Image (tube, rainbow, N blue to C red):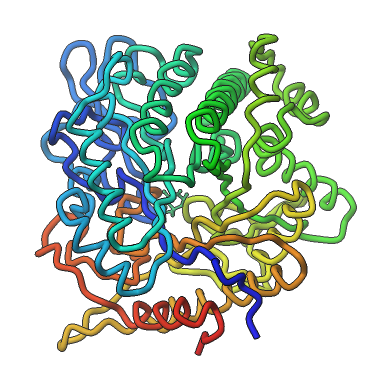
Amino acid sequence: MSHFPKDFLWGGATAANQVEGAWNEDGRGPALTDVTTGGTVNTPRLITYLDKDGNPGTLSRGQSLPEGAHYAVLDGYYYPNHLGVDEYHRYKEDFALFAEMGFKTYRMSISWSRLFPRGDENEPNKAGVEHYRKVFEELRKNNIEPLVTIWHFDTPMYLEEHYGGWNNRQLIDFYTKFATTCFTEYKGLVHYWLTFNEINNTVSFVQVPEGADADKIYQERYQQLHHQFVASAKAVQIGHAVDPSNMIGCMICGVATYPATCDPADVLENRHSWERKLLYCSDVQCRGYYPTYAQRLWNEHNVQLDITDEDLIDLANGTVDMYTFSYYMSNLVTTHKVTDTVGGNFSLGARNEYLQYSDWGWAFDPTGLQYYLETLYDRYELPMMVVENGLGAYDTVEEDGSIHDPFRIDYYREHIKAMDRAIANGVELIGYTTWGCIDVVSAGTGEIRKRYGFIYVDVDDEGNGTLNRSRKDSFYWYKKVIASNGEDLA
Ligand code: BG6
């Protein structure tokens, strides 16, 4: 007997910039993803710009623009997010396929710059507002409950260039206006909201380039996060005021880690790594105040934060209703020299000899999901959702058009079993949305061929293809899983 509650929210997840395309249609303004090129597992994506004299240049992600330069789409580069998988035009077809699988929920995000093309306008772009209204109505027609991420890595480019992005306190007000528009316009259509996708990435994946001032980088990162915490807390308060039935969650990138050895120094380092990379953000968002260890983390880099008394009141009044997270893999933490490393975005570190790795270097670790769920439920005692989980892998289309993806089915089967065990052990898990239920543009590498979907999209890494949708074997398998409420995993 499976332990999934009878109203469990089975579904899938995507993000606007990775599926919609239509990057400059109906008044949408650009975001940084629109000047980000494609990459591969070994070649990083680049951000393109024109310098003050009009010469083209590129940046790595996380680097700042040179003085006087501005972001630009350049000839000779391919920008995969411009097309996505064209969901902007094909959402009806996609939702019908989700309904055929029996989805109870679909996690998607609203592109900020579709509603506020620059980000600092007083009134939203009507075409953008109406687009998402139609989208939510279509989901409801298909009996699919929307689960909406307000910010999924897509701050409008204008705010990045002209205000310095999240370094600037004014972003709190711009975001709050955007969130208020979402809550009021879609009142009654949407009840489940997430304020910031993988908010902890800002401090979890900091790479300090050779010769750079690490303290300066951390100072900025922690301050950006503080602004996002306050923005999130304000959004929670507004969301509740607009509709008290709204359930609003945090969203954490849940890369569980273990000490690589039983050396006490590794065990302690792992605990500190959890604090730095996983708990720092959710402690603030779930409890409403900074944890005791925050001062230690700031001291590591001489960080002095600008925090007002009003901010502290907002944090206390804007705690989230649920804890949601992505889970793909685990990593190891050690104080010892690492000789056998794994590469790939998000997965830098020592290799775990007990685990298998994907072609992109991500560890297959379903037990880690159970460990994570039980640990975090015990910490916050809030309802939980796994809002991203999946396997990016190469797919082959057979001559008859079929796509056999037993590796993906195996991945999901074991993770669903892990969730079932966690529920049996008392975790209040209310939903599960697999990542990239339809193939999407990879956020990390910009590839399409790193495919996650139950639904295959005929498009390649240069944008060639019919964009036609077809069902993989995993499509039929997940349909059975949902129909049996997690009982039939064969
Ligand atoms: C999460 C993001 O980090 O992981 C998604 O929320 C992303 O946007 C997903 O797509 C998988 O990562 P990638 O690099 O394979 O796309």
Q: Residue at x 57, y 27 (%)?
A: 237
In this rendering, the answer to whether 200 lies above or below 7 is above
Q: Is residue 128 visible?
A: yes
- Image position, residue 339 (x, y; %): 65, 58
Q: Is residue 279 left or right of residue 462?
A: right
In the foreground, 446 or 246? 246
- Whether residue 212 is visible to the viewer of this picture, yes or no, is no
Q: Position of residue 195 (x, y in %)?
A: 50, 36
Quadrant of the rendering where the N terminus is positioned: bottom right
Residue 245, x across and y down, in percent: 54, 42
Residue 172, image x and y in percent? 49, 18
| In this picture, residue 158 sits left or right of residue 203 | left
Which one is in front, 358 or 403? 403
Q: What residue sits 61% from the left and 19% below the top?
A: 219
Residue 410 lies left or right of residue 336; in this view the side is left
In the current view of this chain or complex, which residue is farthest to the right? 264
- Up-down relation of residue 409 to residue 344 (above or below): below
Q: Quadrant of residue 179?
A: top left
> For the point 67% across and 25% down, which residue is it?
317
